[in-house]
Image (spheres, grey):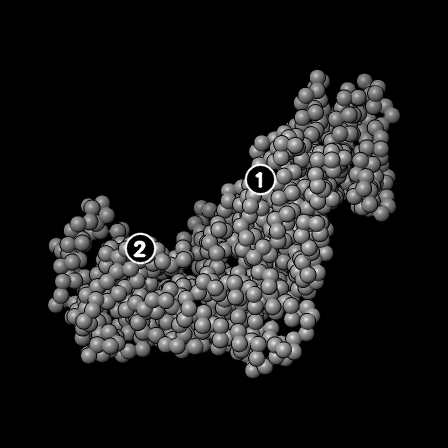
Amino acid sequence: MAESIISPFYVRVSQISSEPVPQHRKDTYAWLAPKLLDSRPGILRQASNSIYLTAEQMRQSPSAIQNLLRPPAEASSRECLIILDLADNPYHLLREIFLYHVADTVVRWLRQYERCKIVVLLPLMPPSSSLFWEIDRSVRSGSRDEVGRLAVLASDGEYRYFFLAAADLNRYRISQMLSNDDLRAQLRSRIVRKRGHYAFAGRHGIHCSRFFFETGAADRQIGDLVVRWAEEKIRPHVRGGRFTLVSHGKHAQRFHEAVAGAAAALGSKFAELDLDTGLGMDQVDGAIALVLNVVHTGDTYKKIISMLREKNFHLAPEALTVLAVDEELPHNYAQPRLSPLISDLPRLKVAKDECEQCVIGLPHTDPPDDELVSIRAFDMWDILRDSPFHPEPYGPSSRLRPRLPLVPDMRQIFSRHGDWIAHKIGLLLAKLEIDSDVVFISPEEPIIDTLTTRLSEIRQNRQIAIQIPRPVLDAEPMVTEVRANRNEEWHRQLRHLGEQDQQNIVLLDEFVRSYSTARAMVNLLRSEEFSEFGMRVKAYVPIVDFSNGSESPIMKTYPLYRLPLP
Amino acid sequence: MMPGGEESPHEASLGLLYHLLRDKDPKGLDELDPGEHALRRLILLADYAWRSYDLAPSTKAHLDSFVIDALAADRGRPWRALGSAPPGTKPVSTKTVDVAILTILLEEFEATVTAFGALPTTSARTSQPFYEASVSCEHSPEALSVVITKAARPLNVHAAAPLARLREYYRPVITILVGIAAGHPGKVSLGDVVVPRNVLYYEPARLTATGLQLRPEHTAPPDPYLYGFDLYDADAGPFGDRMGSHFAELPIDRRPQIESDAFQPAVHGANTSIASGEVVLRDGSLIGALRDRFDEKIHAVDQESYGFAESSRGTSWLIFRGISDYGDPDQPRGWKRLAAASAAHCLRDFLERGYLPANSSGF
């Protein structure tokens, strides 16, 4: 029997030129191919360079990918394994419409070349509402056994259609990990720096801080970094390579889950440390490798160390903390040495007597059980005082309302504080019980795009964002403009969603003034004229409400801050 | 309405005034540039006007005076005065009450509400519960008005927030912390009540090359006679009978074991201190160590007294703590509720027979 042809495509988006395929990707293909071919021999035709789309192509013509991908010449006559590798791209750069064209190519090839297997490698598994899953409908409606020849594999080990052994999936996941620096950068962008007025008791009495950090959105990155740290700094230095990962952190369930997941990947034991109840000997195997969520002054760390020492536990030579937030943290004052993943996010600690918020009589904000969804006036103006104000750059047509003469620079605000605003939106959706299968629909404007990118990071890609062009929303009547845009990405996305019924549709906008944009979006989604969409909107979330208290005429509106205009 | 509630108008107004005063233009209103800064300040002013609209008139008038400061020529850091107006002249509360009671745990709150027969009020616009009651007082011609509230979380650092919210809606003559604490065996028994005249915060310390040097802080109620508690005799009134009945009426499965035939809690007032820190005691030795090292009058230890006392600085306050355990690993079953009830009933008895209101002849 002729050997199979293995043909990988290394695809990069938003690049200005082709680049050599990195060796680690080539190694991945060489490792993966035999697994997918059930150990039968194959001829691996490594490509030397990437296939790329420029940022301009991604914006204007993402369908270009269809022409750039060419199947191997023998695809009609021999068994082939095609590896479409998109895994080295940041997920948020893989536009929905691009994923749609990738899916379309995959389905076409599966139908055309019946002896061909295809595996698509992605950085993250797209959410269920993604256009990528048009692939699902197509292959399942096909008459051939296409499902059995297709695999979709994400870098975190998640997969669809095709089963590798669990151990192989885990190895694949570990092999796909980013460099330490890249992972730390991802971790940093997912840490939520919550503004407020937080009280802490430390060795110098009660003090306050302006920020409280939440790491829950970075659980994947934390898990991966803990695995690497343990392999490099712990396993070689403890007797027999045996250790137990012990996590400690208040109000940080997802952090504990991340460490537990890391322990499973490492094949070590895991325990969550409660300072009140301590640890039992039976919970631990070998040395204790401590992993902390956030370290402030180091007092709690010292307390933990002395508690574990008193009970004669063996401690690994180094402990890890995701965040060290006090400038004066003495990293090396004691053994085990404390190593922080991130140490450049200060919480702005101040003695209670010197705290401006205490002085003016503002109560403390108690994380996490007393967290307001809306933004406090003190915090909002703390942000606004640092923001330039300028005339409204975008908005509905002047026929609907005049542009606002002076608005905050929301692009700067989303860039600097987008993590916290995205966290607030997530909190709102959770309180409304609509935080799964979320689809954010907004006008197509560059500023709101900045926020949806932050939302994507903080929500770990558990969402879809659809942007409607302003000329469509402003058209009167809208129907002609909507029909003329039938082939556009947003139109295709809305049609795709219209066929599903479990999505939580949330309208997102930077401002509301007259509700004209919101009304146009609702009209587009619900009107009988556009029955192919037919969606029910669950909430309208403008970040700032300039409507001077007027009630929304169309739906429930949840602004994060109401700002009256004089 | 936002799910989870909104910031109160008073807190929002304070935050906005701070920024208005902090960001003030050194020039007067007439000289403001028609540029970005001036327009931004106008939006800030509009925001303040909008959010302060629903404040009580006296509160609004007080805060509005700072707006005038914000528009006047620079006078240093006027925002500091926002929180430093003397209590009598800071009209941030809308209703005077004789006694405000802060509880922390749910068991404490329920026991206190039950002891006073309090009912929920609907006037406060916050999720923090406020229950109101009245209680007769031998030293006052009129019954004392009482409001009872509960903190969201334990610990000293969290005692300030519920007190601040309480003072947003009420102007209390005296504020009293009621609840449970761990006691020192040999000095107190389970169910006893401790009314300390000294609070020791044992957490502060200095880290030196040779180790931690503890630097505890002290505070005490402003009135050395504890508003009549010095002369109060718990045994002379109905407190003992009430607690006996309360105990007898408890369902068998919720009734803790006692050594004597009847439940007769003692009240400890003279020469008592309470130690306060952030640690939940389960080691059985800390109370003894604190007594040996700092103050042999320490009868009890809790996690809120110092935060409560510090947040009440400059006002009248007292602490009533029922003893629910001895801070050791074996937590006695069923004592939390009973000890909280002891503290609440003792306070009620004290208010009825021993409390000297500020305007009474005995004060």
- Residue pictured at 67% horizontal, 58% vertical: A404
- In front of the other: A401 or A52: A401
Element class at badge 1: strand
Element class at badge 2: strand
Asked if the residues shown at circle 2 and circle 1 are in contact, with their CB atoms under 8 angstroms apart, the answer is no
Is A311 left, or right, of A163 in this rendering?
Answer: left
User: Cα distance, mark 2 to mark 1?
Assistant: 37 Å
Question: What chain does badge 2 belong to?
Answer: B
Give a yes or no on whether discs 2 and 1 share a subunit.
no
Residue A357 at x, y percent in the picture: 50, 69
Which quadrant of the figure has residue B74?
bottom right
The residue at which mark 2 appears reads as B120
Residue B239 at x, y percent in the picture: 16, 62
Is B311 left, or right, of B250 in this rendering?
Answer: right
Say if residue B193 shows up in the picture: no
The residue at which mark 1 appears reads as A537
Residue B198 at x, y percent in the picture: 31, 74
Question: What chain does badge 1 belong to?
Answer: A
